[in-house]
Amino acid sequence: MSRYFRFFGLERDPFLDTADPFFYCELGALRKAKERLFDSVDASRGLTVVLGDPGTGKTSLSGALEAELLADDRIVMGKILDPTFATEVEFLIAVGRVFGLALPARSSAALKNALKNFFFETAVLEKRTLVLIVDEAQNLSDENLEALRLLLNYHVPQRKLLNILLFGQSELEARIAARGNLADRVDGWIRLDLLDEPTLLAILDYRLTKAGLAPGSHLLTADARALLSQASGGVPRRLTMLAHHAMREASDRASTLVNEDHVRSAMTARGITVKPRPAVIETIPPASAEPAVPEPERPRGLFSRLFARRA
């Protein structure tokens, strides 16, 4: 069975719901966000927090950052995808595991000491940079947020021994802010906001081009592009999801162009509605109508002139 995107002459699915670095479109705010993350890691500043609502690009940003960090031999990186651990001991063992350490289940104090020794050997003796990335960081318990704060205490005069990058939803900000001793250790807050229409349309074009759309070709009508941007609400994940379903709808109808009707079908299938754009109604006077002649202004008395000025 032929894949639907081949109907449009594409080599790959441009709107697959994964954070594929191949389709990572680094525009504006995302470029600045990645630069800030790199600067923090390069200077070993400690803790940086990336915040954003679901679908705003945290995973894509994290994936692009990881690809570049892993390409640098000076960097040792570990990542925790789900930080939901019942106890501090479980969490500390997981931190060691992502760096290749097989730590036995001991007291939290013993585990922290083992991690401190590993951090010192790697960062100071081997002169490498340690980076711990925690995804879905809003799921960290208060106990494990405190464990991270304690790990940030390990440093030498010139640098932190461990860099921690937290990627989480917006509620993470309030939880960290409520812990003053942890909030004071945040080197930078990076917030991923909703995207504007030019950026959303640029993402559509970039993905289609990367998927193999011939230069100068068009797959989406202007109305379809505008509606996709509006219906996405500025959320890139929703944009690509709707574009995917609209393309599938068009291919099912044997249409080589994705139009507004295909997008509306995709929106209906996903339960997404937007307010219709108001129609522009132009009032044209009858051809026989005589132009209105203004009445001459009547002279006004002193009282009426004074009253008009005060009004």
Image: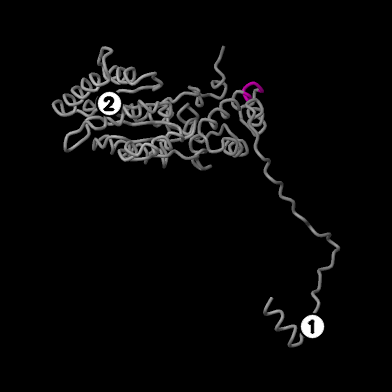
Give neighbour class at mark 1: few <14, some 14-19, many 20+ (Cα, 10 Å). Answer: few
What residue is disc 1 on?
Answer: 298
View extreme (bottom): residue? 302
- Residue at point 50% right, 26% down? 14
* Amino acid type shown at disc 1: Arg
* Amino acid type shown at disc 2: Ala
**Number of marks:** 2
Q: Quadrant of the N terminus?
A: top right
Viewer-nearest residue: 268 or 54: 54
Give neighbour class at mark 2: few <14, some 14-19, many 20+ (Cα, 10 Å). Answer: few
Query: Magenta: predominant secondary structure element?
Result: helix
Residues in magenta, as a range: 249-253
Q: Is residue 281 above or below residue 20?
A: below
Instruction: Tell me which corner region of the image, top left, top right, bottom left or bottom right, holds residue 60.
Output: top left
Viewer-nearest residue: 81 or 216: 81
Q: Is residue 287 left or right of residue 155?
A: right
- Whether tag 1 and tag 2 are in contact, CB under 8 A, the answer is no
Alpha-carbon span between mark 1 and mark 2: 84 Å
Q: Which callout, 1 or 2, points to the residue nearer the camera?
A: 1
Q: Is residue 302 above or below residue 141?
A: below
- Residue at point 55% right, 34% down? 218
Viewer-nearest residue: 48 or 227: 48
Q: Is residue 66 left or right of residue 278?
A: left
Q: Position of residue 252 (x, y in %)?
A: 64, 21
Numbered badge on residue 194: none
What residue is disc 2 on?
Answer: 71
Q: Position of residue 146 (x, y in %)?
A: 33, 29
Residue 84 within the magenta-colored segment of the rendering: no
Q: Is label 2 in a helix, a strand or a loop?
A: loop
